Image (spheres, helix red, strand yellow):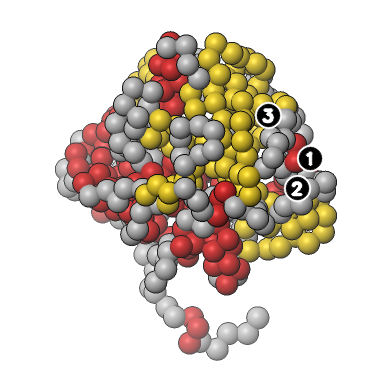
Amino acid sequence: MSRKHLIDLNACIERLAANGDLVRVRSEVDPVHELAGVAYHFEGREVVLCERVKGHNFPVLVGLYWNRAALARLFDCPAAQLPFVVADAVQEWQTRPIEPEVGDSGPANEVVEEEVDLHKLPIPTHALGDAGPYIDSAVVIARDPDTGVRNTSIYRALVTGPDRLTVQLDEGRHVRDYYERAEKQGRSLEVTLNNGIGPAVHIASAVPSSAAPIDKDELGIAGNMTGEPLRLIRSQTVGVEGLADAQFILEAEMLPETREPEGPFAEVTGYYAAQDKRWVVRVKKITRRKNPIWQTILSGKEVFNSVGLVGEAAVFRLVSRQVRDVKGVYFSHGGCGFYHAVVQLKKSMEGTAKNAILATFAAFPSLKMVIAVDEDVDMTNAEDVEWALATRFRPETGLIQIPAARGHELNPSTDHGLGMKLGLDATAPCPRPLAFERVKMAQVDVEKLDITR
């Protein structure tokens, strides 16, 4: 079966429609606030395609990642198995990578724009307090200035002029490391921003550095997901490739020794990221498909799922090697997909839950809180996890406090990323006493019963 829809957004949209996971908004919507407001109505449900965007010729897709069940249908697997499908692809890539192939042409450069004018693109302004239109779903490809190894990642970018963006570069990310080394050499860092891509490339871009080290090209992960090499195309003006099957490619450079205001922006935390002077990108060329679709992401369930999905996969692989009792890892939506993890164990002895908590913090440093639960607790169900906390967590013995630990700088409860981490052991004693056995009910097939409503 073809997996083209995991790379090509057009094929992806066709599959979403066939699965009943797509809604089309045929009324004209304003890209300033209205488009995001319409999409927000469907958050967590169907993917939204806004076909008519005021003042623009191209439609906009929102919500590709906010329904994990719909995403799993694209990967032809149950939703519960999706993190393991991702984990298997990452593991295979680590040992037998399917490297990208580079050519000169593809759908993404069918049209080469004569002039660079970002204002002609249907880039929406999402939240009421946002500073302006943001590119927030484009896959950024860069090359290590010393080794030439490619890196891929996703950053927010505020449009500040026809050819100008300001971007947020998170601490500890590979592209920031690339940029800082290039800046010390007095050079700009060349990049491509690839908008409108299938989920395989997006997921590859979100794999944490613990699973994708700086000396490996993680674009290959997309190839291992689809079973064939990812297609890249040479750029017109920079020495970094773009994605052949993208809808748009923005060829650009991050300027050295240049900072300009960026923000506010509605971030994954549910708060606005404050304005500050940040890094500047100059767009040198725009190429696109003949009839492209712009893609954007609403900060919220889309980010919780896309980041949580790869985080869960990577953490599970790392932690389960150290603590064999671990059966699953879930990054909760209430924890913004970054900050809270639930680890499920089938305990064989006391102490393994605490080991699992500590290993999880080490595997994903952005985490602020990790909760350990037993195998009879649904780790994806917030009510069930709260039940475990209420009936199995003992603060005097089950609380782990790690003061002044490095976390995620976007979390406003930290001091620029530095803060307390908490581990909560909400598992029952091992071996499990009768007092901790859950009530069970008979499994009945009610479809066979005569029931009137």
- Which is more foreground, mark 2 or mark 3? 3
In the picture shown, does residue 1 fall above or below 36? Answer: below
Crowd class of label 1 (few under 14; some 14 to 19; many from 20; radius 10 Å): many
The residue located at (29%, 31%) in the rendering is 215
Q: Residue at x 59, y 52 (%)?
A: 110
- Name the quadrant of the N terminus: bottom left
Instruction: Assign a secondary structure to mark 1.
Output: loop
Q: Earlier in the sequence, mark 1 or mark 3?
A: 1
Residue bearing mark 1:
32
Can residue 434 be seen from the camera position used here? yes
Question: Left of 129 or right of it: where is 406?
Answer: left
For residue 34, what is the image quadrant? top right
Residue under pointer 2 = 35
Query: Which quadrant, please, contains the C terminus?
Result: bottom right
At horizontal 26% and vertical 40% (from top left) the residue drawn is 318
The amino acid marked with disc number 2 is Leu
Disc 3 marks a residue whose amino acid type is Asp
Q: Is residue 120 above or below residue 223?
A: above
Residue 393 appears left or right of 451: left
Earlier-in-chain disc, 2 versus 3: 2
Whether 348 is drawn above or below 25: the answer is above
**Alpha carbon separation for disc pair 1 and 2:** 7 Å
Q: Position of residue 158 (x, y in %)?
A: 66, 29
Which one is in front, 322 or 5?
5
The answer to which image quadrant residue 424 occupies is top left
Given residues 398 and 195, the one toward you in this image is 195
Alpha-carbon span between mark 1 and mark 3: 19 Å
Is residue 383 in sight in this rendering?
Answer: no
Q: Which mark is residue 144?
A: none
